[in-house]
Image (tube, helix red, strand yellow):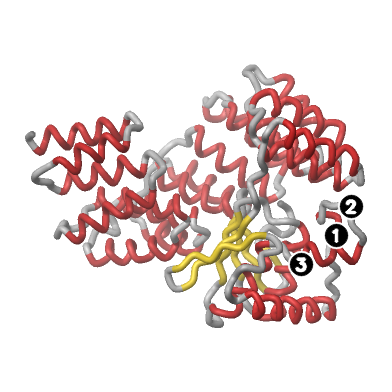
Amino acid sequence: MDVSVSNVMVDFYGKCRCAEKARMVFDAMRARNSVSWCSMVVAYAHNGAEEDAFAVYLGARSAGEEPTDFMVSSVLTTCAGLLGLDLGRALHAVAVRSCIDANIFVASALVDMYGKCGGVEDAEHVFLDMPQRNLVTWNAMIGGYAHIGDATNALAVFSDMITSGETSPNYITLVNVITACSRGGLTKEGYELFDTMRERFGIEPRTEHYACVVDLLGRAGMEERAYEIIQRMPMRPSISLWGALLGACKLHGKTGLGRIAAERLFELDPQDSGNHVLLSNMLASAGRWAEATYVRKEMKDVGIKKDPGCSWITWKNAVHVFHAKDTKHEMNNEIRALLAKLKRQMQASGYMPDTQYSLYDLEEEEKESEVFQHSEKLALAFGLIHIPPGVPIRITKNLRICVDCHRAFKFISGIVGREIIVRDNNRFHCFKQYECSCKDYW
C-alpha cells in the first residue's frame, strides 16, 4: 500500500478512537516517513495511551527520524498526560538542539506540559520568551496557574490576553480562569466573570462553567447558593456538578445537602465508588458512625469496590508505590524510623495530628497512629531518604491529599528545608518553609 494512503489510514483510525487498528496499519507499512511516525504518536496521544505514544517517538528516533515541530509538540502532550516533568525537560532540550523551540506550536506545547506537570516557573520562562502567542498558548499559561491555585497571576495573564488583541478568549479560557479563582479563593472575581461572560465575550455558559462556579461557591462555604444555581441552570446537571457540591458539603460538614448531592450522583453513576466513599467520610467526620457504616455496607452488598488510595514517587527510573499502612517495601524499617523521628520534631514545633480525618470509630491514640501511616507520608519518607538535598521531592496521589498530611507536609518542609510537591487528583500543592502554595485554601 502506498505510504501516503497508509498515513491517512493511521490518522483516520486514530481520530475514530481506534488506536489498535491504527497500529495494525502502521506495523504493516513496508516503508515509513516522518508523517507516519507523527500520525502514530498522535493516534496514541489522542486516545489516552501516553506511554505507547512516547514509545513510538523513541522508535522514530531509533529509526533515524529527525524531530520535527509536529512530532515534538505531539509527544509533549503525552508528557503532560503522564505528568512526566523529566521527560518533558528532555524533549525541551531536543527542541532547542533541533532549533524548533521557538516554533509557536512547540512553545505552546511546552507551556502546556510545564503547567500540567507543576513546573509553572518553567512555563513562565517559555511563555515570556515567545515572540507571538496563540489561543492555545494563553490558555495553557492560565491553566498552569489554575493547577497550582495562583488566581492572581491567572487573572493577570487573562487581562494581558484581552489587552494584547492577539486573540479572543474561548470557553476553555473562562473554565481555566474560574477554576483558578475557585482554587485561589477569589470568589467574587470568579463569580463576576461567570455572571458576565455572555455579555463581555459572547460565550454561553456550558456545563463546565456551571461546574466551576458550583466548586467556586462551595469552597467558599456557600453551598446553598451553589445548589440554587444547579436548580436554575438550563441544562441537566452533570456528574461533575453534583460531585463538586458533594465535595463542598463534605468540606464544610453540610450533611443534609450532601446527602441530596450524593443521591443524585448515585442515580447518574451508581457504580462509582468514590461518591459512596465521600458520603461515608462526610458522615464519619460528623461523628455519625452508624450512618457511615451503613453506606459502606450498601457498597459491599451491591458489589461496589473502593479504589484503594495510593501515592507514588519516582527514583532512578523506578516508580515506588505506597498504600496506607504499607509494610511491604524493602525500605520499610528505614521509612518507619524516619517518620517516627519526624513526628517527634514536628510535635516539638507545635504539630498536633488532625484525627478528624482518621475515619474509623477508634480511640484517639489509635487515630493518631492511623493518620501517620497514610500513603503520601510513606512516599515522602522514601523521598527524603533517597533524593539528594536541593532536589524537589515530587509525589503523586490518586486521591485528594488529606488535611492532616497537608498540615504535616508544611511542618516537614520547614524542618528538613526541602521543597515538596504533591499532585493529588485535584491540583498541585507546593510545600516550602512551613507553607503551601494553596495558602490552605483547597
Q: Nearer the viewer, mark 2 or mark 1?
A: 2
Q: Nearer the viewer, residue 341 or 241?
A: 341
Q: Nearer the viewer, residue 255 or 161?
A: 255
Residue 96: image location, x then y, percent: 28, 65
Q: In the image, is residue 349 above or below residue 402?
A: below
| Relative to 1, 384 lies left or right | right
Amino acid identity at mark 3: Phe
Residue visible at 74% across and 21% down in the picture: 231
Residue 293, by quadrant, is top right
Helix, strand or loop at label 2? It is loop
Helix, strand or loop at label 3? It is loop
- In this figure, which residue is indicated by the disc labeled 2? 361
Instruction: Name which of mark 3 and mark 1 comes first in the sequence.
Output: 1
Do residues under tags 3 and 1 come within 8 Å of each other at their CB atoms? Answer: no
Residue 295: image location, x then y, percent: 80, 36
- In this figure, which residue is indicated by the disc labeled 1? 355
Residue visible at 23% across and 62% down in the picture: 99
Helix, strand or loop at label 1? It is helix
Q: Residues within 10 Å of mark 2 (few under 14, many from 20)?
A: some
* Quadrant placement of the N terminus: top left
Residue 55: image location, x then y, percent: 30, 54
Amino acid identity at mark 2: Asp
| Relative to 136, 8 lies left or right | left
Residue visible at 65% across and 67% down in the picture: 431
User: Which label sits on residue 372?
Assistant: 3
Instruction: Name which of mark 2 and mark 3 comes first in the sequence.
Output: 2
User: Disc 3 to disc 1, how far (Cα)?
Assistant: 10 Å
Q: Residues within 10 Å of mark 3 (few under 14, many from 20)?
A: many
Instruction: Name which of mark 2 and mark 1 comes first in the sequence.
Output: 1
